Image (spheres, helix red, strand yellow):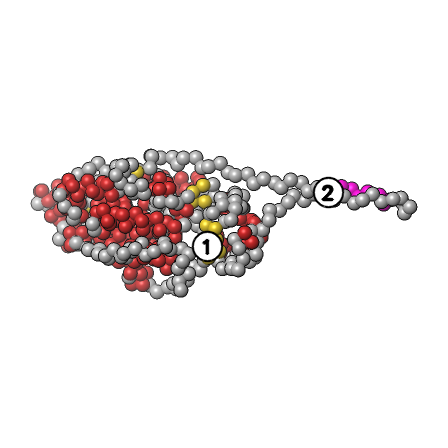
Amino acid sequence: MSQAAGLLLLATTLVAVPAEFPAPEALEPNVRFWESVYSRYRSDQVVIHDTRHLDVVYHVFDLGPFWLFPDTGTSEERLARRAGRKAKIEEELARVGAALGEIEAARRRGARPEGFARELHDRLEEAGRLEMIAGAAGRLRWQYGLADRFQGGIARFEAWEELVTAEFAAAGLPRELTALPFVESLFDPGARSHVGAAGILQLMPATARELGLRRGPGYDERRDPILAARAAARMLRRNYERLGNWPLALTGYNHGPNGVARGVRQVGSSDLIDLIARYSSPSWGFASENFYAEFLAARRVLDARAEHFGDWVASPPVRLHPLELPRSATLDQLYRGPCLEQGEQETFARLNPALDEAALAGRISLPQGLRVYLPRDPAPRSASACLAKRVLASPKLEPPEPEPAAEAELEPEVEPEPEPEPEVELEAPPEPEPGPTPSLAEDPPEEPAVEPADRSEDEGDRESEDEAETREEGGAGPDGPTPPSSDPEASAG
């Protein structure tokens, strides 16, 4: 029997929802764009592309000494790299924009441009895309590649795949949805956006709270892949039941189901392609229009991982056993107890991404009922037996008394009273996250209490804090930046 059975799943499996994920021909250029972002371009590369024709990539360049990941070094070094990246990207955007302007002007004169503009002209001509050159200089945006980080996400996914897939299955959802965490976070439990979304499925605080996930000093259950998958499965099923198909349900996960429902009413169609072509709303932009295409691309790369990244040793699945803390406790009590062997703390930390460093170091008392995962089955021990008693402070030693004379009568020996048990000081709750208020508008009263409220089109909602730099710095174009398409130079169709 699966280790998940009876422990980690919902009590009953719901009626299965059809696994229908169409790939419309009109969306295929966008899917190819994102597929190449996930599998071809590295995170130290920047892609400059057309916002209207996503499969047209004008220029790809390396960041060189201004790499983005990993963001190591002193704060001064990181700030210097960030400033260098920003200047480099602006320089290359201006260069491509000027070249496209030269090409357009030369075509009006019946001439051919020179230099870099000539190279770009010839690539576009060879690809048969010169006809879309009009206004192209105003449709530029830039994007970091993600191939190396996607590959790292696959290693994390393989470890948790069985358990996450089981959560979706328990909700009656198809396994194809396991690609969603790659769109949201590249399957990084520690991913955190600059607006406060966290975990592999980038749940906002208010939505997570409505879905029963807890967070407090030392822990955040949004970072637990199992609990996050369970919460997201509820959201996805509600979206599907309300919106009627997976393209809209997945778009609703990003944009908000209420906003998608408004789009359906406005255009009079439940076809995502019609919404992309005709829906108009301040919050409906590049991210919302591309979210389903990103999902299809992530699914393709995930299914063809060996083809894209070559053969590698698959990560073994995690083996864990849940334990609910029987009382408020610090983890040093668990480390000293009989349910963890010496040297297993590193494994314990890997199995519990919901816990932060202070909690793992035993500096914070965690609440009663919080679930943690052990690498081995603690049976037949009870949960209480897994926790060692708190250590009492050592009594102060007084200088030895001189031995009494042999004939003197000894006073009865009195044991010194132990000093009172040191209290564990709880950290104060974290201050509110800086940045905009979580982009979740309240649902109408008739909606169920756990219905996720609208998420705005802000792309930061589904990125890690490092990736958020991409959005904050912005790419040229109406919606700001995101991940690319075919050839590194000028790819068409």
Q: Residue, x 60% and y 49% (percent of image)?
A: 389
Mark-to-mark CA distance, 2 and 1: 41 Å
Q: Which mark is residue 322?
A: 1
Q: Is residue 434 found left or right of 253 in the rendered image?
A: right
Q: Amino acid at mark 1?
A: Pro
**In the rendering, at what x and y percent does residue 119 appear?**
19, 50
Residue 395, picture quadrant: top right
Helix, strand or loop at label 2? It is loop
Classify the position of the C terminus by image quarter: bottom left
x, y percent for residue 167: 35, 55
How far across and down, in percent of the image, does residue 97 sit? 21, 41
Q: Which residue is mark 2?
A: 416
- Residue lying at 35% horizontally and 51% vertically, measured from the top left: 230
Q: Are marks 2 and 1 in contact (CB under 8 Å)?
A: no
The residue at 87%/44% (across/down) is 409
Asked whether residue 403 is drawn in magenta, I would say: yes
Q: Is residue 273 above or below residue 425?
A: below
Q: Assess whether residue 449 is covered by the magenta stretch.
A: no
Instruction: Specify the segment rendered in magenta.
Output: 396-404
Overall secondary structure of the magenta stretch?
Answer: loop
The answer to whether residue 58 shows anywhere in this view is: no
Comparing 321 with 160, the one in front is: 321
The disc labelled 2 sits on which kind of residue? Pro
> Which label belongs to residue 79?
none
